[in-house]
Image: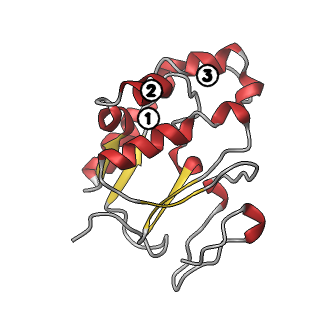
């Protein structure tokens, strides 16, 4: 039995892939606008608040999978994770379906480092890649919602598969 998949976004959350932010946030602080931050972030507070989220999810019975723990055996992906200040927004670079992961190509060039890291995390979990977006197409998963009963993905995004 597979241990991944989602058919819509309104059911109970059982398992989630998160990235706990760290020193890569210093890259965003050097040039916040280039990384779509409104201003520099307090790295320590950001990380502390994120751990509170992780703890709350675990207390609610959600299995929390942390990206760096998953890619720790992949030196290239681990190193790349420290070059991706927006990796904490894991929902943007991929979405899950019952057929596997959909990997997106981010519009902001500085964010394109995220997808290979997320792909390595899925590989560590033995989750297949159902779709991987390629240039010149771009899409951010924060703009995607899987609706109960299925959803189509526009050809304009470079993704034409119905789920």
Residue visible at 57% across and 47% down? 93
How far apart are labels 1 and 2 at the CA level? 5 Å
Q: Which of the two labelled residues, at mark 1 and mark 3, occupies the earlier sequence position?
A: 3
Neighbours of disc 2 within 10 Å: few (<14), some (14-19), many (20+) = some
Foreground of the two, 110 or 73? 73
How far apart are labels 3 and 2 at the CA level? 10 Å
Residue 33 placement (x, y as % from top left): 77, 26
SS state under label 2: helix
Q: Which of the two labelled residues, at mark 3 and mark 2, occupies the earlier sequence position?
A: 3
Residue visible at 28% across and 30% down? 73
Residue topped by disc 1: 50
Neighbours of disc 1 within 10 Å: few (<14), some (14-19), many (20+) = some
Assign the N terminus to one quadrant of the image. bottom left
The numbered disc on residue 47 is 2
Marks 1 & 2, CB-CB < 8 Å contact: yes
Residue 162 placement (x, y as % from top left): 59, 78
Residue 25 placement (x, y as % from top left): 56, 22
Going by the image, does 85 lie left or right of 82?
right
Marks 1 & 3, CB-CB < 8 Å contact: no
Going by the image, does 160 lie left or right of 119?
right
Is any atom of residue 9 visible in this view? yes
Foreground of the two, 10 or 74? 74
How far apart are labels 1 and 3 at the CA level? 13 Å
Residue topped by disc 3: 41
Is any atom of residue 48 visible in this view? no
Question: Is residue 43 depicted above or below 5 in this figure?
Answer: above
SS state under label 3: loop
Going by the image, does 49 lie left or right of 114?
left
Specify the quadrant of the image occupied by residue 85. Answer: top right
Question: Is residue 66 depicted above or below 127 in this figure?
Answer: above
């Amino acid at each position: 039995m597979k241990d991944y998949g989602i058919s819509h976004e309104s059911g109970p959350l059982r398992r989630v892939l998160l990235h706990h932010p760290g020193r890569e946030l210093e890259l965003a602080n050097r040039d916040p606008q280039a990384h779509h931050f409104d201003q520099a972030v307090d790295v320590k507070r950001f990380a502390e608040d994120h751990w509170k989220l992780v703890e709350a999810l675990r207390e609610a019975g959600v299995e929390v999978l942390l990206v760096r723990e998953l890619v720790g055996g992949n030196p290239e992906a681990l190193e790349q994770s420290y070059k991706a200040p927006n990796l904490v927004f894991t929902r943007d670079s991929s979405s899950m379906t019952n057929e596997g992961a959909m990997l997106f190509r981010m519009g902001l060039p500085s964010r394109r480092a995220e997808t290979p890291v997320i792909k390595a995390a899925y590989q560590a979990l033995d989750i297949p890649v159902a779709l991987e977006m390629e240039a010149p197409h771009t899409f951010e998963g924060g703009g995607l919602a899987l609706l109960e009963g299925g959803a189509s993905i526009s050809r304009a995004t470079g993704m034409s598969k119905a789920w």
